[in-house]
Image (spheres, rainbow, N blue to C red):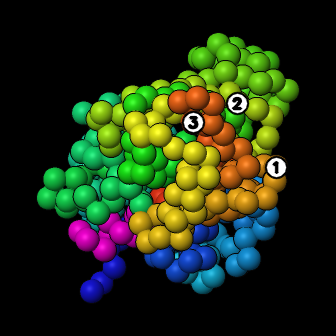
Amino acid sequence: MMMKKIAIYGFGRIGRQFLRIALDNSLFTPHAVADVKDVKTLGALFSVDTNYGRWHGTVAVSDTAFILNENEISYIDSSKGIPNWGEMGVDLVVDCSGRATKREGAQAHIDQGVRYVLVSAPSKSLADCDAVLLKGINLDHFDPAAHHIISMGSCTTNALAAPIKVIREAFGIEYGLFSTVHSYTNSQSLTDQPMPDLRDSWAAAENIIPSSSGAAKALQFIWSDLKVTGKAYRVPTRTGSIAELNLVTTRSCTVEEVNDAFRRAASGSDLAGVLDVLEDQWSSARIVADPHSSIIDMNLTAKQGDLLSIATWYDNEWGFSNRLAEVAQYIAARI
């Protein structure tokens, strides 16, 4: 069966890592990349990345294409609007622009002739997408007849969903809170200057900056009865994050039982490649460029009375981009 045509809309931090992963793992070769910036600059940024180094392949550009390892991928200047996907025969658009979190943003692609949109961000509400689908959690619920706008949630959504799935199934969850210590991103400022979110107005590389997290809402799109909420703290690291999840479980459990449940899940089929465990003591440098969505730090699992505390690492760019590429491949094979 012929592979469906996939296009990338938005070639920023996630879009570029998404393409590297798709090519490196032979998942697919996108038909096109659309962005508002010029192709020469985008090619250079793809070729050499501050966080992940030089791409091992060959990179060249023309006015209308990226040539990557001799694979020609069309470049489209989208500064004047969304391309006509129908004319190109594109079947799936992966929107990495960050601007499709409301239905009208994703619908704009469908209005241009594509049938399916995969959004690399948490939708504002469940009404703004047809489904939130995560690998290892509920991806097998994908219904091509009903799900045309699919959200992947956020990197933190994916990092928390895996341990929540394990704890829910093994011990049950009454309620909980999480805090994620997250690397700074392009939504922040390099130097002090006014920004739409007041706290983002201070220099990202010099401050610990409290931030909201859309992960709690996205998790409730998957488990409507889940009573877990939380917040984020942006810190001066370029990539790599850790989330602390504090839960009251339905059934009694010990630290050893919880860690054993994570070990079994990491070696099982559903969460293979999604969840991993760390038995030794590490810092965030250990998980940069790790492809897992959620990496449980076993030494940080703790219990006090009825309160269970776990900590999970994740490379907020690379881990999420791996899942995004895998989900895109999964959807494209079923439409």
The magenta region covers: 325-335
* Element under disc 2: strand
322 over 68 or under it: above or below = above
* Element under disc 1: loop
In the orientation shown, which residue stands out farthest toward the left?
145
Tag 1 near tag 3, CB within 8 Å = no
Tag 3 near tag 2, CB within 8 Å = no
Expressed as whole percent of the image width and height from the top left, the position of residue 245 reads 57, 36
Expressed as whole percent of the image width and height from the top left, the position of residue 238 reads 77, 44
**Majority secondary structure in the magenta region:** helix
Report the residue at 38% width, 51% height from top. 169
For residue 39, what is the image quadrant? bottom right
Question: Which disc is residue 234 wearing?
Answer: 2
Mark closest to the chain's N terminus, 1 or 2: 2
Q: Which residue is the site of mark 3?
A: 308
Left/right of residue 84 with respect to residue 229 in the rendered view: left
Left/right of residue 81 with respect to residue 199 in the rendered view: left
Expressed as whole percent of the image width and height from the top left, the position of residue 104 reads 29, 35
Expressed as whole percent of the image width and height from the top left, the position of residue 201 reads 71, 17
Is residue 120 visible to us here? no
Neighbor class of circle 3 (other Cα within 10 Å; few <14, some 14-19, many 20+) is many
Q: Give the camera-side residue of 309 and 253.
A: 253
Is residue 297 visible to us here? yes
Q: Amino acid at mark 1?
A: Ser
| Viewer-nearest of discs 1 and 3 | 3
For residue 319, what is the image quadrant? bottom right
124 over 219 or under it: above or below = above
Q: Which residue is the site of mark 1?
A: 283
